[in-house]
Amino acid sequence: MRSDAERLQDILEAIKRIQSRAQVDRLQQDELLQVWVLYHLQIVGEALRSLSSELIQRYPEIPWSQMVGLRNLKHLYKEPPATPKRTKRKSKQ
């Protein structure tokens, strides 16, 4: 099991990566970059979710549950395209 310190380091690394590449003007135009940022936000959310209750209780002023919600951003983003329904072919008789 990873320690809180390791998880916090994961969070910092993901944030640094986002800050290094995600300028607002590029982000609005580059779908691949949008997906990349969402991936790193999910890393942040998952790492936050795995922090110990001791650490979370030590800092009650931090909105932990809201930040953990970052891992669910993919559900708020664009819906995947609908999958076409398959139709049965009529057999030739």
Image (tube, rainbow, N blue to C red):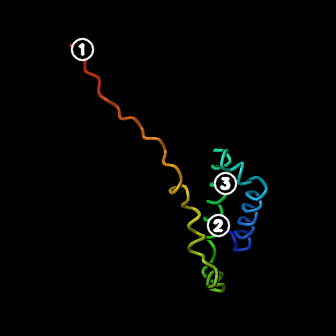
Q: Nearer the viewer, mark 3 or mark 1?
A: 3
* Picture residue at 76% right of the left edge, 52% below the top: 21
Which residue is denoted by mark 1 in the rendering? 92
Amino acid, disc 1 = Lys
* Picture residue at 60% right of the left edge, 80% below the top: 53
Label 1 or label 2, whichever comes before in sequence order: 2
Q: Secondary structure at mark 2?
A: helix
Which residue is denoted by mark 3 in the rendering? 37
Q: Where does the C terminus fall, quadrant-wise?
A: top left
Measuring from the top left, give residue 66's x and y in whole percent: 57, 72
Q: Can you say whether 63 is above or below 32 in the image?
A: below
Q: Is residue 16 left or right of residue 92?
A: right
Amino acid, disc 2 = Ala
Q: Secondary structure at mark 3?
A: helix
* Picture residue at 62% right of the left edge, 85% below the top: 60
Measuring from the top left, give residue 28's x and y in whole percent: 65, 49
Q: Can you say whether 86 is above or below 1 in the image?
A: above
**Counting other residues with Cα less than 10 Å from the Cα at mark 1, is it few (<14), some (14-19), or many (20 or more)?**
few
Q: Can you say whether 90 is above or below 64 in the image?
A: above
Q: Is residue 13 left or right of residue 63?
A: right
Label 3 or label 1, whichever comes before in sequence order: 3
**Counting other residues with Cα less than 10 Å from the Cα at mark 2, is it few (<14), some (14-19), or many (20 or more)?**
many
